[in-house]
Image (cartoon, rainbow, N blue to C red):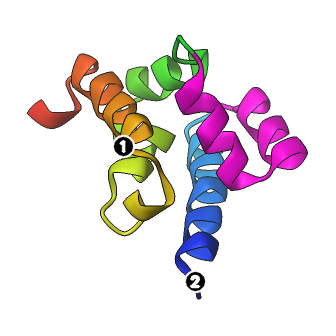
Amino acid sequence: MTVEEEFNQHLHQIGETAKKHNYNPTYFLRMLEDHGEFETAKRLLNKSEAQQGLFTLWELGLLHELVEAAVLNERFQPLFTKKEIVEARRRLEELGFFKQ
């Protein structure tokens, strides 16, 4: 399995995990369907503001399930630009991800 395939699988798993916690990330799932996994991640990271789903997953204690957390995974970092990685880290820092 390629890194890209692993990343794609990981993003779909995020949606499944959210559903197991009684949260249906409709916008995220629609983006996956409309744009594909990689493009969805890039679009989310390049928005000036984080999406509501990020805060919902934070409230559920699922920060490790965020797209931003996946981007910081060393295995997936080569897929992203330095700017995207920095943005993912900034968002996670604001949510206290690294203090866990």
Does label 2 or label 1 sit earlier along the sequence?
Answer: 2
Which residue shows up at 56% across the image and 62% down it? 10
SS for dot 2: loop
Please report the bounds of the magenta region as a residue range.
23-47
User: Quick one: label 2, few (<14), some, or many (20+) residues within 10 Å?
Assistant: few
Q: Position of residue 83 (x, y in %)?
A: 40, 35
Quote the CA–CA distance across marks 2 and 1.
21 Å
Rendered image quadrant of residue 68: top left
Inspect this view and state whether residue 100 appears. Answer: no
- Nearer the viewer's eye, disc 2 or disc 1? 1
Q: Is residue 69 magenta?
A: no
Q: Which mark is residue 27?
A: none
User: Quick one: label 1, few (<14), some, or many (20+) residues within 10 Å?
Assistant: few
In which quadrant will I find the N terminus?
Answer: bottom right
Q: Position of residue 20 (x, y in %)?
A: 60, 46
Q: Is residue 17 left or right of residue 27?
A: left
Q: Is residue 82 left or right of residue 44?
A: left
Which residue is nearer to you in this view: 83 or 55?
Answer: 83
Q: Is residue 33 left or right of residue 29?
A: right
Which residue shows up at 26% across the image and 17% down it? 94
Inspect this view and state whether residue 77 appears. Answer: yes
Residue picked out by circle 1: 82
Magenta stretch: dominant secondary structure: helix
Q: Position of residue 59 (x, y in %)?
A: 41, 20
Which residue shows up at 87% across the image and 47% down it? 33
Which residue is nearer to you in this view: 65 or 46?
Answer: 46
In which quadrant will I find the C terminus?
Answer: top left
- Callout 2, which amino acid? Thr
- Callout 1, which amino acid? Lys
Which residue is nearer to you in this view: 41 or 59?
Answer: 41
Which residue shows up at 57% across the image and 26% down it? 46
Q: Which mark is residue 2?
A: 2
